Amino acid sequence: MTQTEQFIKATEKLKTEHKIIRLALIILNTLRTQIEGGKKVDTENLEKLLEFFSIFADKCHHGKEENFLFPELEKAGIPKESGPIGVMLYEHQSGRHYLRTINESIKNYKSNQDISTLAKIAEAINEYTALLENHIYKENNILFAMADMHLPDEIQQKLSKEFDEFEVDEIGPQKHDEFHHMLHKMKDDLLGKSKVLDVRDIAPAQRHTLIFEEFNKLKPSESFILVNDHDPKPLYYQFQAEKEGEFDWEYICEGPVIWGVKITKKS
Ligand SMILES: [Fe+2]
Ligand SMILES: [Fe+2]
């Protein structure tokens, strides 16, 4: 293998970060669903997630895109103003606005316990989630595909190195791994150690088959967390028809963008 074949492409590194950001959005929307269901507001975990989105997702991840990837794409002829880069930059700004709103609202809630503040937090989380999910979809499927077409391996390799250096300069050498650890621990604490089966990137026609395969692999009293982009009601009816009395179905995250259900095999 040559030296240029061994490195991880800059766009692949960003896609890997998108996965962890999407896991954080699942957890954030689980907490939002709890708020809407009248449960105790978990301000401690909400604040930890906000730190993750502000530092990991915005400062580091968006920082890598804005300071290194986008300028290389411009050099390769992809237009900034009135083009895809301009749209991405605008969306990064909108995300910062929502994060500020959520942050301020949590602070207000901690001091006044006002119920109307909770509605504001939930609304801003919904808007932030819709924005970020759509943004990540466009980057993964359009902008990064353009990048892979236009940027030669040497540039991808240079960017990859610049990303690593930028991250260490911005947050220090350990923080990236600490964020991963914090997020997985929070997932385990809030949702249990069950596997997260996110079918949103799988073709709709294949989703149900895959989900039933996963269910059949479960031992009694084991679960998985199904994540989908719509209310999986039709799947529930299929489970009722094919697995009646064999499963428990518990919504943990109720839309409008992300839906999560804990499906347990009864013992
Ligand atoms: Fe971005
Ligand atoms: Fe991104």
Image: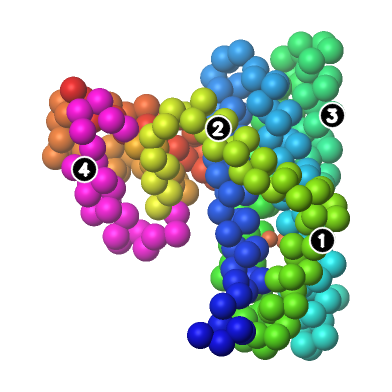
Q: Position of residue 10 (x, y in %)?
A: 66, 71
Q: For the residues marked 1 and 2, what is the alpha-carbon distance in whole angstroms?
A: 26 Å
Residue where numbered disc 3 is placed:
104
The first of marks 1 and 4 along the sequence is 1
Report if the beta carbon of the residue with label 1 is closer than 8 angstroms to ligand 2.
no
Q: For the residues marked 3 and 1, what is the alpha-carbon distance in whole angstroms?
A: 28 Å
The first of marks 3 and 1 along the sequence is 3
Q: Position of residue 29 (x, y in %)?
A: 58, 35
**Is residue 208 located in the magenta-colored stretch of the structure?**
yes
Residue where numbered disc 4 is placed:
217
Q: Are marks 1 and 2 in contact (CB under 8 Å)?
A: no
Where disc 1 sits, the SS reads helix
Q: For the residues marked 2 and 4, what is the alpha-carbon distance in whole angstroms?
A: 24 Å
How busy is the neighbourhood of tag 2: few (under 14 within 10 Å), some, or many (20 plus)? Answer: some
Residue where numbered disc 2 is placed:
185
Q: What amino acid type should be assigned to the residue bearing mark 3?
A: Glu
How busy is the neighbourhood of tag 3: few (under 14 within 10 Å), some, or many (20 plus)? Answer: some
Q: For the residues marked 4 and 3, what is the alpha-carbon distance in whole angstroms?
A: 44 Å
Q: What amino acid type should be assigned to the residue bearing mark 2?
A: Lys
Q: For the residues marked 2 and 3, what is the alpha-carbon distance in whole angstroms?
A: 25 Å
**Is residue 88 among what the camera can see?**
no
Where disc 4 sits, the SS reads helix
The first of marks 1 and 2 along the sequence is 1
Q: Residue at x 37, y 63 (%)?
A: 203
